[in-house]
Image (cartoon, helix red, strand yellow):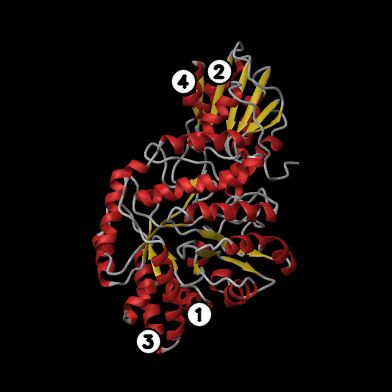
Amino acid sequence: MNLHDQIGQMFTIGFDGFTAPDHILEWLREGRVGGIILLARNFESAEQLAELTRTLHAAAKHPLLISIDQEGGVVAKMRAPYFSEVPGAMAIASSSADAPANAYNAYGIIGREMQAVGMNWDYAPAVDLTYNRANPTVGTRSFGTDPEKVGALAAQAVKGLQDNGVAACAKHFPGLGDTAIDTHVALATLNAPLEQLIARDLIPYRAVIAAGIASIMTTHTVYSALDLDYPATLSSIVIHRLLRGELGYTGLIVSDCMDMKAIADNYTPAEYVVLGALAGLDIILVSHNREAQAAAFDALLEAAESGRVPLSRIEQANAQIAHMKAQYAARPADLSALRTSDAMETGLKIAREGVAHLRGTLPINLDWRIVCIEFASVLDSTVAERKSMVGFAKRWGERTNLPAFTVRVNDEDAFAEALTAAHGGECVLVITRSAHLNEKQAGKARQLLAAAPSNVLVALRNPFDGAILPEAQTVICTCGDSEPQLMAAIEALLDDFSPTGTPPVTLE
């Protein structure tokens, strides 16, 4: 492979649309792209997605990695009605004794369905610890606060993916949990002592490395105890000394997306691509910006030709990439593997086991005049979703024939209508999504909870909503709002089963 193509192997890029633009197909044919990341903007249906990946693979001069953020739960680009939805990390961890098997089975479903539509690399699992409930990026994506448990469950997630032909990727190295800053919008700095990093945050990475994980993703966060000058993504201290040296990791290392403001607001493509390659990145991820993608490729090729980036570093990266591609080759699409009865039943089983009854009395009394009000999701972090998520109220209404409303936080007219209905009921059922991160949602939830003699709170995402809303008499939490988790929450309220989940975080 010539130097031009070796440089191309080190780039994974994205694009807008349900079909590949001409310039992407041209770059693939020329060998200047080694991987493609797909996002929600690229999905219309399973058939469309399978055709898109077929087109990409067919155009590629060299074997191609097609990747996605598919963690389950909140971060899942492949969703119903075309794909099986499974609970995410916190719900899995909440499922107690069955958690290891649930982690393996949930990520096995993800792996099989990715392969079924021509993808072979998943940016999952997230192994960040839940330090900070104000963190908008981690939340239910985390397996919890206990580093040993997080590591054990993450290792099972890795095996579930990789046993089904998809390369796993632990993130965000060396740990993103102890910050309230979303690196999509700003550069974060952590001043935690090195001893804490080693004794806590690195434990899950040791576990996934021992499990044979194919790749690890770095974070755009400055760790002052390690490197005051560069974020982890661009730091040879973090990548070479810590990850390669201290942890002995020998697999592939990929950056988080360089279009995120933590990097893009502080470095040009020519700067970050050279710094990243020198620090030890094997693959540089540029998800959005065509001009940045082109400039980064040209800058790295020029740096390699001039000797600023040694050819040995390019060769090392290509060896890692070739090894992972050989292990995780994409297969022809097989849409019959999507949304199988076994996958759907498994997802619902995991969801049921993850539901936690935090306080109050269950089941809900259907003889009451019950009014259900669901808050549509707000954008906690740009990694989570592109639009509001809903669905509980519709399912509740279909199951019970009771009045149900969906309210967006900023829609005052809809809220006023729902509040009036709540005042006329004997019980109000309030459905929140991370109200602890959104004071406006929390304030409106308080008004609703006070509107009827009895109330029930369903915290569809973080369990912290139960702690900040002490007005709620009965509280259950699902640790996520994937399709099976909405179904499980309704079943728990109606006494189809008794919730036994235990959230893996401290709620006080």
Question: Which residue is denoted by mark 1 in the rendering?
Answer: 278
Residue 213 in the image, given as x and y percentages of width and height: 53, 62
Q: Secondary structure beneath disc 3? A: helix
The numbered mark, 1 or 4, whose residue comes first in the sequence reads: 1
Spatial CA distance of label 1 from label 4 is 57 Å
Residue 66 in the image, given as x and y percentages of width and height: 37, 59
Give 273 or 505, whichever is nearer the viewer.
505
Spatial CA distance of label 3 from label 4 is 64 Å
Question: Which residue is denoted by mark 3 in the rendering?
Answer: 305
At label 2, the amino acid type is Ala
The crowd level at tag 1 (other Cα within 10 Å; few <14, some 14-19, many 20+) is many
Question: Which residue is denoted by mark 4 in the rendering?
Answer: 398
Residue at 34% from the left image edge and 81% from the top image edge? 3
Q: Residue furthest bottom?
A: 307
The crowd level at tag 3 (other Cα within 10 Å; few <14, some 14-19, many 20+) is some
Residue 354 in the image, given as x and y percentages of width and height: 61, 37
User: Is label 1 in contact with label 2 (beta carbons under 8 Å)?
Assistant: no
Q: Quadrant of the N terminus?
A: bottom left
The crowd level at tag 4 (other Cα within 10 Å; few <14, some 14-19, many 20+) is few
Q: Nearer the viewer, mark 2 or mark 4?
A: 4
Q: Quadrant of residue 434?
A: top right
Q: Nearer the viewer, mark 1 or mark 2?
A: 1
Residue at 52% from the left image edge and 58% from the top image edge? 184
Residue 387 in the image, given as x and y percentages of width and height: 44, 42
At label 4, the amino acid type is Glu
Spatial CA distance of label 2 from label 4 is 18 Å
Question: Which residue is denoted by mark 2 in the rendering?
Answer: 421
Q: Nearer the viewer, mark 3 or mark 2?
A: 3
User: Is label 3 in contact with label 1 (beta carbons under 8 Å)?
Assistant: no
In the displayed structure, does residue 238 sit left or right of residue 78?
right
